[in-house]
C-alpha cells in the first residue's frame, strides 16, 4: 500500500550539464516540506547528446516525472522539443520550465517573471521609469530584455562588447530596444532609472570594470542577475555611489515558483527563511 502511494507522488527534476551545482533541489525541497506535500525534486544530469531521449521518456511517461526545470545548455532544445511552448518561450527561443498536461509537453520560460518579481519585492516602484540600461546581450539577457519591455519601459539601451549580439536582440524584441557598444555606456546611462547587469562580470570573485553610475537618476535602482557573491562588485560600486541596489538571489527563488505550482499543485511563497537557507548554502561552498 505504501509503495503504491509513493509511486503516485509527483516527481519533478532539474536537468542540465553539469547540474550538480544547482540549488533548485534545495528550493523545491524546502517548499515540499513547508507545505507538507508529497513529492520529490531530483537532479538529472543529461549530456546534450542524450537530451532528446530524456524528453521522449518524459513525454511517454516512462521517466516517471510530471515535469521539471531545464538549465544550461538545454533551454533552447527544450523549447524546440516541447509540444506546446507558450508565447514567452516562442519569443525567447528558450524554455526553462516543462510540464505534462493532457498528454502533451508544455513549456514556458519563468526567468523574466523571476526577475520582475524580485524587483517588485525588494524595490517596489522600480518600473516607474521610462529608460533602462541592460549590460550584456548573451543568453541570460534575453528574458530580462523581454521582461523590462513588457513592464512598459520606453527606452531599453542594450550595451555589449560585441555590438552585433546587441543588434540581434534589438531586432528580436522590437523598436524600444537600442543596441550600443561598451564605449557608449556613460552616455546611455544619462537619465536612466534602471541599470541591470546580465553579464558574468564579478561572478565568483572575478574582477569587474569600474562603472560610473553618476548619469543615472538619483532615485534609480541597480540590479545584477548574478547572485554569487550576493553583493557583486558592480552592486558594491553602485552602492558606494549612493544608488539603491537589488541582488540577484530573488530572481532564482521567484523563477522557481510557477513550476512548483504546475507540478505539485500549490503556489509556494518566497520567504525570508528560504532566502536565508540558500544564503547559508552559498556560504558553505
Image (cartoon, helix red, strand yellow):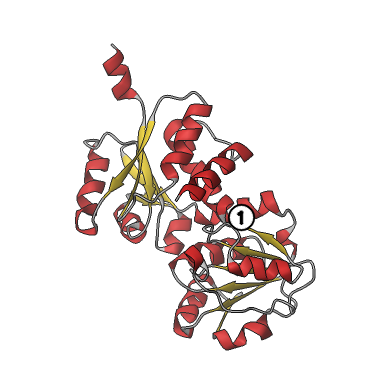
Q: State which quadrant residue 174 falls in.
A: bottom right
Q: Is residue 101 visible?
A: no
| Residue where numbered disc 1 is placed | 116
In the rendered view of the protein, which quadrant contains the N terminus?
top left
Estimate the x, y position of residue 193 in percent, counting from the top left. 72, 69
Crowding near pointer 1: few (<14 within 10 Å), some, many (20+)?
Answer: many
Estimate the x, y position of residue 65 in percent, counting from the top left. 31, 36
Viewer-nearest residue: 119 or 130: 119
Q: Residue at x 33, y 43 (%)?
A: 43
Q: Is residue 282 visible?
A: yes
Q: Residue at x 20, y 49 (%)?
A: 53
The residue sitting at the bottom extreme is 183
The residue sitting at the front extreme is 284
Residue 237 shown left or right of residue 79 in the figure: right
Estimate the x, y position of residue 37 in percent, counting from the top left. 46, 25
Give the SS element for disc 1.
helix
Compared to 152, does 159 lie above or below? below
Viewer-nearest residue: 157 or 228: 228
Q: Residue at x 74, y 72 (%)?
A: 241
Compared to 50, does 221 lie above or below? below
The residue sitting at the top extreme is 1
Q: State which quadrant residue 93 falls in.
A: bottom left
Viewer-nearest residue: 36 or 241: 241
Estimate the x, y position of residue 50 in percent, counting from the top left. 20, 53
Residue 153 shown left or right of residue 275 in the figure: right
Amino acid at each position: 500500500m505504501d509503495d503504491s502511494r509513493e509511486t503516485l507522488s509527483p516527481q519533478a527534476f532539474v536537468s542540465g550539464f553539469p547540474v550538480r551545482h544547482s540549488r533548485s533541489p534545495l528550493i523545491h525541497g524546502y517548499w515540499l516540506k513547508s507545505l507538507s506535500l508529497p513529492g520529490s525534486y531530483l537532479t538529472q544530469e543529461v549530456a546534450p547528446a542524450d537530451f532528446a531521449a530524456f524528453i521522449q521518456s518524459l513525454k511517454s511517461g516512462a521517466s516517471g516525472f510530471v515535469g521539471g526545470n531545464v538549465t544550461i545548455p538545454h533551454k533552447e532544445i527544450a523549447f524546440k522539443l516541447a509540444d506546446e511552448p507558450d508565447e514567452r518561450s516562442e519569443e525567447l527561443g528558450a524554455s526553462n520550465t516543462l510540464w505534462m498536461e493532457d498528454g502533451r509537453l508544455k513549456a514556458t520560460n519563468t526567468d523574466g517573471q523571476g526577475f520582475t518579481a524580485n524587483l517588485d519585492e525588494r524595490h517596489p516602484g522600480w518600473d516607474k521609469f521610462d529608460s533602462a540600461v541592460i549590460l550584456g546581450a548573451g543568453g541570460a539577457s534575453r528574458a530580462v530584455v523581454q521582461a523590462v519591455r513588457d513592464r512598459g519601459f520606453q527606452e531599453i539601451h542594450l550595451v555589449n562588447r560585441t555590438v552585433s549580439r546587441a543588434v540581434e536582440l534589438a531586432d528580436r524584441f522590437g523598436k524600444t530596444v537600442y543596441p550600443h557598444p561598451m564605449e557608449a555606456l556613460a552616455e546611455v546611462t544619462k537619465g536612466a532609472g534602471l541599470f541591470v547587469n546580465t553579464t558574468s562580470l564579478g561572478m565568483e570573485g572575478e574582477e569587474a570594470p569600474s562603472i560610473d553610475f553618476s548619469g543615472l537618476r538619483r532615485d534609480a535602482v541597480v540590479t545584477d542577475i548574478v547572485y554569487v557573491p550576493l553583493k557583486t562588485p558592480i552592486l558594491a560600486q553602485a552602492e558606494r555611489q549612493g544608488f539603491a541596489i537589488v541582488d540577484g538571489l530573488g530572481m532564482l527563488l521567484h523563477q522557481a515558483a510557477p513550476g512548483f505550482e504546475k507540478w505539485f499543485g500549490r503556489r509556494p511563497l518566497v520567504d525570508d527563511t528560504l532566502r536565508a537557507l540558500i544564503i547559508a548554502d552559498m556560504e558553505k561552498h
